Image: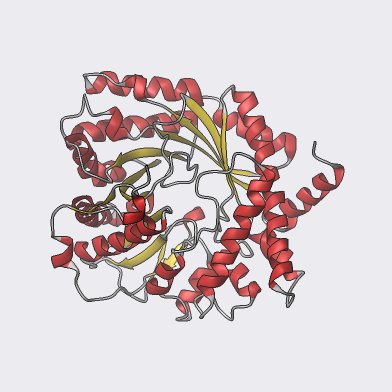
Amino acid sequence: MISRNEVIETNKMIEHENLDVRTITMGISLLDCCAAEVDVLCENIYNKILRYAGNLVATGEAIERDFGVPIVNKRVAVTPIALVGGCACKTPADFVKIAKTLDRAAKAVGVNFLGGYSAIVSKGMTEADKNLILSIPEALACTERICSSVNVGSTKTGIDMDAVRLMGEVIKKTAYLTRENNSIGCAKLVVLCNAPDDNPFMAGAFHGVSEGDAVISVGVSGPGVVKTAIQKVRGENFELLCETIKKTAFKITRVGQLVAREASARLGVPFGIIDLSLAPTPAVGDSVAEILEEIGLESVGAPGTTAALAMLNDQVKKGGVMASGYVGGLSGAFIPVSEDQGMIDAVNRGALTIEKLEAMTCVCSVGLDMIAVAGDTPAATLSGIIADEAAIGMVNQKTTAVRVIPVYGKTVGESVEFGGLLGSAPVMPVNGYSPEAFINREGRIPAPIHSFKN
């Protein structure tokens, strides 16, 4: 039971501290849509998405009105399409047909993004996996709402370096094919290690094969709420600081749980998980970087940043698991550059580099996220960045990711505007020394010794 005081406190967080439910995401299994013919497969996919998600947006809007809780996005995630299309799709062009069908379905149900144009290739690629990956540039160029992800590694299997090399080339081609719109296709493409089956956040969301036929998951947010809370304990010891973050995360998660259970009941779809990640936006006061600075850093990127982020991430998780037994997904703190005004400011003042961001990814929820680099950055360099992040995830048994955007025609020092929640980003420099000979070795990096648990 939620008390009167909790309601009042929640209203204050919504009105003054940017608390929102960032997304309601319906996961839908498409495994029973498989067919031998592409056209039949596409029809099955379209019909199932409309059958399950037809009322998703209207239900989300009704919950917003009834409870006064802003729900920013309504989204759908589907089974990795490389698995669904393996029988019918013989070429990359066949997979592009599915991408167009998914985009049409997303528009029909009214969601802003649909995730799951994905392949899981942590140990090797099937022909279907490779064809889907090769289709990604065209698929993202000819659709509006499709998000794509490729999982190239895991702690259990190691890193598929053939896939890593290929993804550097795919990112470059995607940037070129969407060059008229600041290479925005790359903002809808993420390369992962240890991808979770139940992540409601884009661009990495897909409906894992371990999930049921359909599920409702919710991603909450609230960097502004956390910042406001820790302002009240400025200068106090770490014990009080940590307790304050935990208690605030508890309150945020309770809001998400309320929305998730209500959406589940109204849609007749099982409740999956709450992802309590602190997901920033370009809005003033809705920044993870500002939380770190409030903790005591002159600027995010200063010595001590990684330690502060590790503490923040851990306390958010501890507070969340007290509030809900169904915490999952990524859950922690996102550090996307373009989506966080505090991060943008730190880059512009020279305090934050890609190398420091990489160090921070050892302890945060995901990885190098929404980072713009020069359009002429070599594919091998992009693959090297992916390999580094995958290694961090593999060795540390955590999810890591790379969403990097080589903006066609842009150079270091310029800025690029993506719009909406994607924000804007300064074009950041990358190390100019080449990893090409390393990237061009064939095969995979074996799993670490601690992966052998049986």
Asked whether 104 or 382 is in front, the reply is 382
User: Residue at horizontal 48%, vertical 60%?
Assistant: 423
Q: Is residue 261 visible?
A: yes
Q: Is residue 191 visible?
A: no
Asked whether 282 or 24 is in front, the reply is 24
User: Residue at horizontal 21%, vertical 19%?
Assistant: 36
The figure's colour scheme reads secondary structure
User: Residue at horizontal 25%, vertical 45%?
Assistant: 123
Q: Is residue 151 left or right of residue 438?
A: right
Q: Quadrant of the C terminus?
A: top left
Residue 171 at x, y percent in the picture: 26, 55
Residue 345 at x, y percent in the picture: 51, 74
Q: Residue furthest front?
A: 454
Q: Quadrant of the N terminus?
A: top right
Residue 194 at x, y percent in the picture: 38, 48
Q: Is residue 50 left or right of residue 152?
A: right
Q: Quadrant of residue 77?
A: top left
User: Residue at horizontal 59%, vertical 81%?
Assistant: 298
Examine the rendered structure and indicate whether residue 260 appears above or below residue 190.
above
Residue 158 at x, y percent in the picture: 28, 51
Examine the rendered structure and indicate whether residue 176 appears above or below residue 29.
below
Examine the rendered structure and indicate whether residue 80 appears above or below residue 402.
above
Q: Is residue 182 left or right of residue 107?
A: left
Asked whether 66 or 258 is in front, the reply is 258
